[in-house]
Amino acid sequence: MLVDEKLRNFNSFWWTLIVTIGNPKQLLLYNTEFAFAYDNDNDKDKEAPLKYFLSFPILFTLSFFICNSTNEESFVVVMSRQRSRRIELPPAHENIEKLDKVVNEGNYYGAQQMYKSISARYVSAQRYSEALDILHSGACIQLSNGQVTCGAELASLYVETLGKGKVPYDDEILDRLKKIYKLFPRVPLPQHLWDVDDMQKLSDNIGCAKIRVEGCSSFLKAAIKWSAENGENRNGSPELHIMLAEYIFSESPEVDMAKVTYHFVKGNNPKKFASTLVNFLGKCYPGEDDLAIARAVLRYLSFGNLKDANILIEEIQKLIESAEVEFPKTELMQFIKFLLQTLERDALPLFSMLRANFKASIEREPTFNEMLDDIAEKFFGVQRRNPMGMFGDIFKLMGAE
């Protein structure tokens, strides 16, 4: 029935009042059905039901009052039935096809808002699998079109939805995360920034590189956290740690080797890490080479991983033979060599002597002493001394440290 016809059939207030008194539930049902019919015929006006009820305040109040006195659940039941009817969502692939078309037409921003709003509806309906399909498709197509900021945002929303849906970590999800990761752009910067003539172009490239690294890092850090909470490895997926380490190393304008080291060590692949370190040795500033190697070895050892620390050193020495770089010959490297030998046996006095004799080299980087304290605890059971005493322990419990 057309809306106009319903209006004509509904134009007598007194007749309606009689019907209300006689059968309030029937009238209320009719009111509601009419309002939603009006809404369906006027899709552009999403507040049609509300406007309709407001246009008949006396009638609605009276009918609700009488209905409430007879059966207070009637209104709730009717409204719930109509609401459930309205939130029916089509299969995800239908929305994906439409959104792909919007992106391919070049309306990246408009598509971004649609990806976010449409996926949110599926999440609200607890249809997490379809919401994930939409977000994954959106992240991939935006990144494929060079829209790094948009793609990174949808990638992070994808991981957030994995958490909301309590999706367990498995190989299938890892493959989907890898697909997104591989679509983040890789634009190599000049090895020596001072050799570039066009400084404006260089500045623009550095700015874009920072955006890429920040976007990819946010996505992968969220994925690592999710994998730690929903997988078997409490440190998070080793594969995701390696992906993050590689992207930071290859795309950062100024590489933070401390971050690269941390994630490579968590990635449990010392051979791949060794290859990255040898690459770094060939382009780092003087004095950074031995620090990078020492930092890597000490980080493995601070986690109690003597095996991978030894593999790392052995692999670096093998790779250096075929590369045009030399293994650094410094006191710090001598300390690392002696330290690895000391940890093969229960030799706490020798460990303490090494720390004292190579104190100057160790203090070249502040974090080395902290990692050595961890190593002493892991291998020799030495409890770390808290410089703040009792108050330090209290702050630790409060999460201040």
Image: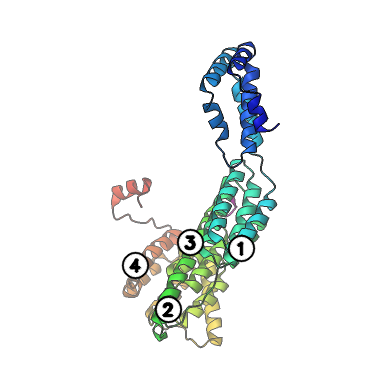
281 sits left or right of 84 in the view: left
Q: Amino acid at mark 1?
A: Glu
User: Image point 55% across, 21% down: which residue?
Assistant: 60
User: What's the CA distance linking mark 2 and mark 3?
Assistant: 39 Å
Label 4 or label 3, whichever comes before in sequence order: 3
User: Is residue 166 in the magenta section?
Assistant: no
182 or 139, nearer to the observer = 139
* The N terminus - image quarter: top right
Q: Which one is closest to the eye, mark 4 or mark 1? A: 1
Please report contact status of discs 2 and 4: CB closer than 8 Å, yes or no.
Answer: no
User: What's the CA distance linking mark 1 and mark 3?
Assistant: 51 Å
Q: Amino acid at mark 4?
A: Pro
Q: Main secondary structure of the magenta part?
A: loop
User: Is residue 233 in the magenta section?
Assistant: yes
Q: Residues within 10 Å of mark 2 (few under 14, many from 20)?
A: some
Q: Residue furthest bottom?
A: 324
Is residue 239 at all visible to an observer of this figure? no
Is residue 329 at all visible to an observer of this figure? yes
Q: Which one is closest to the eye, mark 4 or mark 3? A: 4
User: Image point 33% across, 48% down: which residue?
Assistant: 395
Report the span colored magenta. Answer: 230-235
| Residue 202, numbered label | 2
Q: Which one is closest to the eye, mark 2 or mark 1? A: 1
User: Image point 62% across, 45% down: which residue?
Assistant: 122
Q: Which one is closest to the eye, mark 2 or mark 4? A: 2
**54 is higher (above) or lower (below) than 136:** above
